[in-house]
Image: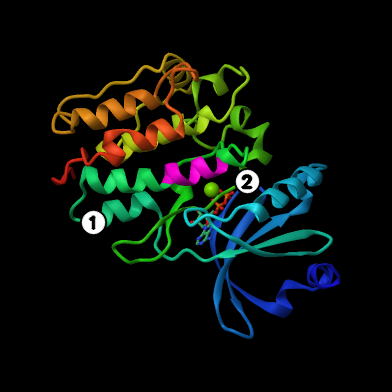
Amino acid sequence: FIKESGKKAKDISAVYELKEKLGEGSFSEVRVAQHRRSLRLVAVKCIHKRALKGREALLENEIAVLRKIHHENIVSLEETFETPTKLYLVMTLLTGGELLERILERGNYTEKDASRVIQQVLEAVRYLHQLGVVHRDLKPENLLYESPLEDSKIVISDFGLSKMEEQGVLTTACGTPAYVAPELLQQMTYGREVDLWAVGVISYILLCGYPPFYHDNDTQLYRQIIKAEYEFDSPYWDYISESAKDFISHLLQKEPETRYNCEQALQHSWISGGEALEKNIH
Ligand code: ADP
Ligand code: MG
C-alpha cells in the first residue's frame, strides 16, 4: 500500500522521459516514454484532469476496471502516476501500427487474414463481456498491431475510457458515428450487443475497404444504421465467400436480441471452420 501510494505521488518525469506524441484525443494525449533506468519504451496516456470536469470518480472507476484486465489482445495498463492536474497511464507500447494502415501497405490480403484479426478481437471482447465490461468504442483506429512482424497479434488499444465519453458519443460533432449500433442511436437501453455490431462493421470494412453505412449527412447515416440498411454491393463483394457474408449478416442485425453474441460469432465457420478464403481480395 505504502509503495503504491508512494509511487503515485512521485512525478512521472523522475521515472520516465516523455518523448514524441503518438496521438491525441478529446481530453488526453498519448506519448512514447522511456523508462530512465531500463531504457524500455512505453506508451503513456496523459489525461488533463481539468477536461474531466467533475467526472474524476468515473475515471477512477474505469482505471480500477482497467487494472483487472489481463488479456493478450488488450493493451496492458502497467502503472499510473498522478499530479494535481494530470493523470498518466503507462501502457505497453504497441509498435506494429494501426490495423487499416497496415492492411493498405500489404500487397496481399485474404479473407483468412481478416478472419484471424476478427477472431482475436472477438476473443478480447468475450473476455471483457465475461468481466461484465462493455467496450462501446470498437473501431479500426483502436486496433493496433503489437509489433511489425507479419504474424503479430492485434491489440485493442483504447480501452475503458471510452465510457467517459458517454454524453459525447451522440451529441458532439467530432468523431464518426459509423460504428454505432442502432439501439445506441435510438437511445434505447443497450448492452454488450453493441460491441458485436461494431465487430460486424469492422469485418465488413476489412473485406471490401469501405464502411457498410456511409452518408455525408449524419441524419441520413443514422437512418441507415437504425434500419440496418446495408448491402454487399457488386462488384466489390462478388468474390467474397457466402460464409463471410453470412457471418457479417448475423452481426449487423438491427435487433440486439437476434444479433450473434461472442460465443456464436467465434463458432461461426468463417472464424473457426476454415471457410475464410485464402485468395487475395485487395
Ligand atoms: P483516444 O482516447 O484519444 O482515442 P487512444 O488510446 O486511441 O486515445 O490513443 C490515440 C492514438 O495513440 C492511437 O490511435 C494510437 O495511434 C496511439 N496509441 C495509443 N495507445 C498506444 C499504445 N499502447 N502503443 C502505441 N500507440 C498507441
Ligand atoms: Mg482512440
Please tell me which residue is depicted at 52% across the width and 29% down the height of the picture: 194
Amino acid tagged 1: Arg
Residue at point 76% right, 42% down?
A: 58
- Residue 19, image x, y percentages: 58, 73
Q: Look at 32% across and 56% down and name the residue there.
A: 102
- Image quadrant assignment for residue 86: bottom right
Q: As rendered, which of 36 and 118 lies closer to the eye?
A: 118
In this rendering, position of residue 53 left or right of residue 104:
right
Check contact, mark 1 vs mark 2: CB within 8 A: no
Amino acid type at mark 2:
Gly
- Residue 182 in the image: x percent, y percent? 50, 20
Q: Nearer the viewer, residue 191 or 36?
A: 191
Range of magenta residues: 121-128
Q: Is 125 contained in the magenta span?
A: yes
User: Which residue is disc 2 drawn over?
Assistant: 160
Q: Main secondary structure of the magenta part?
A: helix
Which circle marks residue 106 in the picture?
Answer: 1
* Mark positioned earlier in the residue sequence (1 or 2): 1
In-image side of 172 versus 177 (left or right): right
In the depicted structure, whether residue 53 falls above or below residue 239 = below
Is residue 129 something one can see in this rendering? yes
